[in-house]
Image (cartoon, helix red, strand yellow):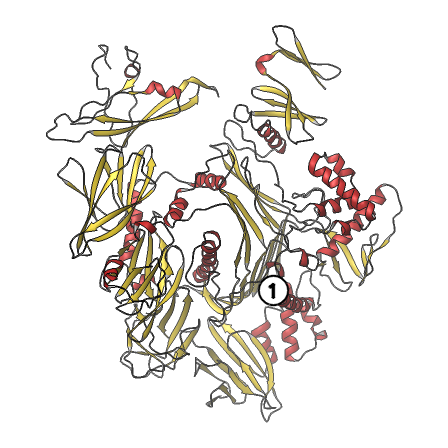
Amino acid sequence: MTKRGNEVECVGTVAPDSKLNLPLDAVYTPTNVHGLFFSIEGYMVSEQFIWKDLQKTISMTKLLKCEARIRQEIVEPFYIKVVGEIEQVYFENTSRYTMASTIYNVHLYPSIYLKNFLPINIIINLPGSVQEKLLEAGTSYQIPTIDPGKSCIIIKLPNYLEKDWSCKGEILANPPEFSVWSFESFDSAQKVIMDLGMHTSYDHGSIIMALYCPFWMLNKTGLMLSYRKSSKGGKEHSSPIKSGEDYLNVLYHPENFKGPILFSFRSKVFFGKKKAMIRVEDGEWSDKFPIDVAGSDGVVTCKYNGLTYQIGVHNQLTYNSLTKQITFTPYYVLINNSDYLIECQEGNRPADPMIKVPPRECTAFWPRSDHEQKLLKARIAGDLEKTVSFIYTESHTTLLKLNNKYGGINVDIQISEGGIYISLSVYNHGNAPALIINHTPHTINFWEKGSLNIRSIQTYNKMFYTWENPAGPRKLIWEDSSKKEIEETLRKDTLGIFHLPDLEEQVFYVSFLDGTQRVLLFTSNMKIAEDCQLSDDFEVIEQEVLINIHGVGLSLVNNITRSELLYMCIASSGIIWEIRKSSNHRWRSLTTREVNLIEEGYQKYMRELQVGKDPMQKVILEPKLEVDYLNMEMLKPNRRYLRRTFQTGLWLQYRTSVHQVQLHAKINRLQIDNQLADCIFPVILAPVPPPKSVTNAVEMKPFAELSMIKRLLVHSNVQQFRYFKVLIQEFHVKVDIVFINAIMGLLETNEMNDVEENKLFKLDVKLVDEPLMYHVRLITTAEQKNFFDLLHFSPLKIHISFSMTGGNSGPSAMPHVLNVLLQGIGVTLTDIHDIVFKLAYFEREYIFMTHKQLIHEATLHYVGQAIKQAYVLVLGLDVIGNPYGLVVGTMKGIEDLFYEPFHGAIQGPGEFAEGLILGVRSMVGHTVGGMAGAVSKITGAMGKGIAALTFDKDYQRKRQEQLNIQPATLQEGLARSGKGLVMGVFDGVTGVVMKPISGAKEEGVEGFFKGFGKGMVGLVTRPTAGVIDFASGSFDAVKRATELNEEVKKVRPCRFLQPDNLVRPYVREHAEGHKILNELEKGKYSNTDIYFYHLYINKDVLLLTDKRIAYLEHSDLFGGWRVHWTHTWQEISELPKLVDKGVQIFIKDTSKKKLRLIW
C-alpha cells in the first residue's frame, strides 16, 4: 500500500517454485496497514493478507480471490490459497527466542490439485470454460479457478472398453478422505455405471484430489478371462446368473487386450471386504477369493470344457497405496533357458500335441491329465527322442538323458504359493546325478531301485549316470557278499564299506562333491576313501579368533526434535551354573530349576560367611542334589566339577583350517526400549521366557545362536555348507502409533514432488505391458551355486502388541500409507494385545542354491507367512489358501513346520564335527575307543565324549513329546543377574514364578505371610531400596511369586540432549535428572525449563534448571516427586553462602528477606 492509502504498488514478482524476500519499506507501510496484495497476469488485485495477525497464532490460512480484468475472455476468478507461518529464530548471537526474532513466511498455493492415478488418460471440463483439459495417466493438474464448496467439475474417460464415460462431481469445502465417483456410459442398450474412488488429502491448505481405481486386473494367462464381483447373497459359483446381472456385473478380459481392466465395486460396498470370482471363457465360475490382501499369492481353480485350469493370483500394492494390481498367471509355467526350441508333453498322454517352448522364453502349461502322478516328457525340436517322464509337482533338479548330440535336458522345478515354474536347459558340467568311478580291480554291478536293468562299470573306469526313472525312488543299489542290498541316494556325502560277492576283499564307497558334480567312488584303498570324505575333519585348526563382548548399546536420536527414540542393547545373561566331568573339558549348563536351587543355596552360604559364621561346606539342596560350595563340586546325583559364571552379551568363535571354516556366534539377550516420554510400551522388543511347564527342565538358551561349518573345496569355487543353523527364541514386539510416527519422521526424505510421483506411477503402468516371463518369479541360475547339507532357520514365535494411543511425545495420527491401505479395505485398526504370530521354520537339505535364491526363498517364506497372519489375526480378513503359509508334504527335501523355539537344539561346530567322526568311524568298522587319536587333533575346549549324539537324541524325544505345548499365562522369572551386569533385573531373580507356599519352604507358614505382607506393602507404598535390601532372600522369592506379572524394565533412562542439539556421550546422571524434570508435577516444567543439574539430599532432590532452583520431595504414597519450594534465578538477591549447616540462599521479597538453607 502506498502513502496515499488507496492504491497498491508492485514490489516484486515471484516465479513458480521460488521465493522473494520483501524489503522493509514494503512490509512496514506509512499507513500502518500490515497487509500484502497478490495478483497474476489477466486478473485484478486480491484482497489483502494481513501478515501481522500471525503474531496472534502460529499459522494462518486464507483463500484470496482475484477477479478477471476482462470478463468476456475469462469468466471464473482466480483463487490463491495463502498460508502464513511464523518461525522462531535465536535473537542475534544468543540462544534465546524473543518477539523480535521472528520470520514471517507466506506461501502461495493453488486451491485444488487433481491427480490422475488411472492407467488411462482423462479429460477435465471446468465450469465457465469451453476448453477441455487432457490429463495424462499419472500426472497432476492445478485448478486455481475453483472455489471449494461452490463449484463442480466434469471428468470424462474417453474410449475405455470402447465406451465413453463421464461423471459430474461437486467440489466440497470439506470433502471426506474417501468418496465414490460414479461414471456413466450410454453407448450401449443399457446405462452402465462404473464406480471409481476419489482420495482427498490436504497439503499446505490445498485440497489434493486423486482419482483412482481400487483394482487393476492384469491377464497374463493367454486365455479369455471374465471377472465377477462377489454377490451379497453369497451365491455358489455354480449358480445361474441372470442375463441382466451378467451384463452389468461381469467384466470380460480378452487374452489380446493390452491394458488392465479397471475393477471396482458398487458404492455401497466400495470400502468393505471384497471378494471376486473368475472364469475361463464361458465355463464355471471359480470359488470366491479375497482381493484385499496385498502382498500375498495364491491359486484359484476354474473349470471349462471338461478341463481344470489352475490360475495363480498375485496381489501387489502400487506406489500410491490406493490401487492393488491383481495379476493372473498360469499356475504351471514352462521356461526354456536354452538356445534351442524345446517341446514338452504330458507323460501319460502320448497322443497330445507337443507344447512348444521358444528359446529364452516361457509358455503356459495347462495339464489335461487327471492322473494322480503328474508327469512330463521333453525333447529338443527336430529330434524325435524324448526324455523319460519326470514329476513336475515336486521341487527337484534332475538331468534327463538323451541319446543324441545334446546329451540331455536339465529340469529345475521351483514351487511358490502362486505358481510352479518348470525350468528347462541343456546339459552342463555338473548336472549329472553322479559320476561313478571304479577304482578297484573288479567289475562292479549296480542297478536302480525298481529297475531290472543291471549296469556294470569296468575296473579302473568311470561313467556319468542319470536316473532311468526320475519319478521313482531315486536310489542306486548294489549287493555285498551276503546278498545284502546297499542303497545310495546320491544326495549327500557318505562313506561305507562292503565285500564284493565271491570275494573277501573290502571295498570302500564314498560319495562327495567335486565342484557341482556328485561323485560316487569305489576303492580298495581306505586312505583314499577317508581323504575324500573326512580330510577336513581331521585337520588341525590353524587359526582361532574368540570375541567376548559383555554388552553393546545403540541409541537412535533425532537431534532436530531433541529426543531419543530408542535404545537397543545386547546384554549379558544372569548367573548360570555349569558342570563337567573330570575326564572332559566341555562345560554343560544345568537346567533352570537346578540353577535356581544352587544359586539360592550359594547366596545363603555367602551371607553366612559375610556375617562371620562357619557355614556347612556340603549342602543337601534336595534329596538328589548335594553341592560342595567350598571345593565347587556337585556330589549328587553325579560327581562333577561345578562353576558359577554367566554368558557374555555377544560371543563369537571363528576357526579355520586348510579345508574348513567354522563359525559359532551367540547373542545372549537383545532388548529394544522405547525412549519417548509417556510411551505406552516402554520395552519394544525383549525375549519371552519359556512357559513354566518346561522352564525347570531345560537349560537357559541365548536369544539368538548361529552355528556354521563350511568346507573349502580346493579345485572348485563351490562352497559346501555342511551345517548352517540359526535359532531365535520367542520374543515380543510392542509398539504404539506415536513411536511409529517418530521413526517415520526420522527416516522420511523430502516430500515427493510431482516428477518423482509420476516416475513411480510409470513403473506401475510398465508392469501392465510386461510379458509373462517378467512375472515369473525366478532367480537367475547363472549365479554361482552353493551346496547345503543342512540349512535350518528356526521358527519365529512373536507376540505382537499395538496401541493406537500414545503420550504427548509426538503425533498420534495414522501414517498416510497405512491409513490409505486400511481405509481402502474398510478395516479399522484398533489396539491389539499379545497376538501370537507363529512362523514355521525354513529348512533345506542336500540342495544347491545361489545366494540370491536363498535370500529370496527365506524372505518369501517368513514375510509371506507374516503378511497372511497379519491379515487374518489382526485385520480379520480372508486369504487365499492356508493363513499360516505352511507347505507340508508337497516337496521332497523341504519341510516347513513349526516347533516351539525353546525346544530347538543347535550344535556348535566342534560338537557337530565330533559327532560326525564318531558316527562315520563306527559305520566303517572302527570302535569308538579307537578314535582317541583322531579326535585329539581337533583343537578347542571339547573332549572325546559322545555328549553331542546323546544330547541330540534327547532333543528329538522331547520335541516329539512337547511339540505344541502352549506357554503359561504368567510371565515367568528371568535368570538371576549378578552385581554390575548391564541388565540388572530387580535384585536378581533366583527362581521361577511359583505358588507363594512353595516359595516359603525355608521359613514355613510364618515366612509365607511375612513375605506376602511385605510384597503388598511394596506394591502400594513403593519403599526405598533400603527396605528391599533388608528383606531376606526367601521374602524376595515369595514376593516375586505373589506378583502376577513381572514386567521387563528399561535398561536406562532416555538420553538428555542439550539445547544446542548436539549429541554428546551418554551421562546417566543427566538422564536421571532430565527424567525427574519431565515427570515433575505431570510435566508442568518440561516445556519451559531445561535441565542443568540435580543433587540427592537424603531422600530429597535439589534440582537446577536454566530458569529456577527447586527442592523436591519424594511421595512415598503415590510415587514420583513434588515441589517443596522453588524460586527463579531472578528471585535470588545475592550469591549463596557456604555455612556450617549447608548452603544459604538469599531470596528477594518486598516484605522481608527470606533465607533458604540447604544441608
Q: Is residue 807 above or below residue 520?
A: above
Q: Outermost residue, right direction?
A: 614
Q: How many marks?
A: 1
In the image, 192 versus 1011, the foreground residue is 192
Residue in view at x 47 percent, y 38 percent: 742
In the image, 229 versus 1096, the foreground residue is 229
Residue in view at x 63 percent, y 79 percent: 924
Q: Is residue 737 above or below residue 862?
A: above
**Residue 876 x, y percent position in the rendering:** 45, 54
Task: Report which quarter residue 726 is drawn in.
Answer: bottom right
**Residue 528 x, y percent position in the rendering:** 58, 78
Q: Is residue 261 visible?
A: yes
Q: Quadrant of the N terminus?
A: top left
In the image, 204 versus 443, the foreground residue is 204
Helix, strand or loop at label 1? It is: loop
Q: Outermost residue, left direction?
A: 72
**Residue 953 x, y percent position in the rendering:** 66, 69
In the image, 978 versus 481, the foreground residue is 978
Residue in view at x 26 percent, y 20 percent: 48
Q: Quadrant of the C terminus?
A: top right
Horizontal side of 54 relative to 809 (left or right) equals: left
Task: Report which quarter residue 361 is drawn in.
Answer: bottom left
Q: Amino acid at mark 1?
A: Leu
Residue position for label 1: 963
Q: Outermost residue, top direction?
A: 1151
